[in-house]
Image (cartoon, helix red, strand yellow):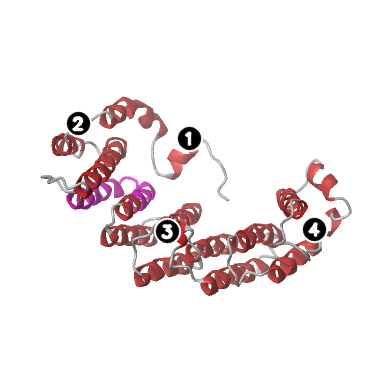
Amino acid sequence: WPKSESASAHEHRLGLDAELAGEMAPVAAMMHALAHEDTDAEARVLNAAYKHAAAAAPGRLPHVLVPLLFRFLQLARRVRLAEEGGATLEVSCGKLLAFVGQIVQAVTAAAPNLALRLYVQCAQVADSCGDDDGAYEYLTQAFTLFEEEVAEQSAKLAALSLLSAALPHMTSFSAEQYETLARSATQYGATLLKKPDQARAVAKASFAFWPLAGLSPHRNAQRALECLQRALKIADGCKRSGMHAPLFVEILDAYLWHYEQGNDLVTLAYISSLMQLIDQHVAEWRSDWQAASDAPGAPAHVVRYVATRRHISAKVRGGSQKYEGLQL
């Protein structure tokens, strides 16, 4: 769902200076080039680089510490593989994963939006290395930053979208840990200032309750359906702003995703009812769906809805039985 944006707009949203980013690019490239075949030696090199980089001016810190952070995360993965092979190392994977948190803390004051994304990245690496406590701590820090430091509503929605998308791909959490994090994504989504943003965030939170990673035991069909229904209810309250129909179309895509991914509680009846509701709000375009999508000035949500109908029609023509009985 996120719209594409230019590099400069992306840097602005993360609190970075585009001109300074260009100036610091050679330094960042140098940081990425710091490597050694011996993991302990590379850890010492990166630690020395960190001591120098941490002394940079606040505005320059993100540009020198972020590439260094990714070097540490790559090294952590290498060390983890070596440890699994029986190697005895001076610098362990656990030490590296604990240290990267200090780097993100150093970035936080200068660029909190960027720091939130870095915490998510650290959590993903910790999860892949089997460090569930570390991954949970970093996601907790990300939610804390969201609550305390992220001010712009667009940045809040982007942050929650990222968290809801990243969580289903993590596999090391206990059932209690996962439930807590998934609920947080839902609850924070409902606190956004603008109703359309609330609807989008809650709908996206449904994905956290139906992870695909390894057919995760953390799946909760009821919670996912509750998120979708709550998103529809919020969207229905956006009639004054005229955003209800576009939101219905976006939420339909989420319903279809759950349906196709085997969430038994998201049935064809729900999809049929939602499509009938959308049909009522785009009645002026219903006479010819093909013309509607090709017409100059056609609303984006109408074009998107027509594309969704075509997708379903193609599934039916291809012999899929999942959509039998759905009136198009």
In this rendering, the answer to whether 296 lies above or below 201 is: above
* Residue at x-position 76% and y-position 63%: 324
**What kind of secondary structure does the magenta stretch mostly adopt?**
helix
Disc 1 + disc 3, Cβ < 8 Å: no
Residue type pointed to by label 4: Val
| Residue that carries the numbered disc 2 in the rendered image | 36
* Residue at x-position 24% and y-position 46%: 103
- Residue 27 is situated, as x and y percent measured from the top left of the image, at 28, 28
| Residue that carries the numbered disc 4 in the rendered image | 282
User: What label sits on residue 167 in the rendered view?
Assistant: 3
- Determine the CA span between mark 1 and mark 4: 35 Å
Foreground mark, 2 or 1, reads: 2
Secondary element under disc 2, as helix, strand or loop, is: loop
Task: Compare residues 171 and 178 and report the one nearer the observer.
Answer: 171
- Residue 213 is situated, as x and y percent measured from the top left of the image, at 45, 57
Secondary element under disc 4, as helix, strand or loop, is: loop
Work out whether residue 268 can be spotted: yes
In the image, taking residue 44 as reference, residue 223 lies left or right, namely right
Foreground mark, 4 or 2, reads: 2
- Residue 301 is situated, as x and y percent measured from the top left of the image, at 71, 52
| Residue that carries the numbered disc 1 in the rendered image | 7
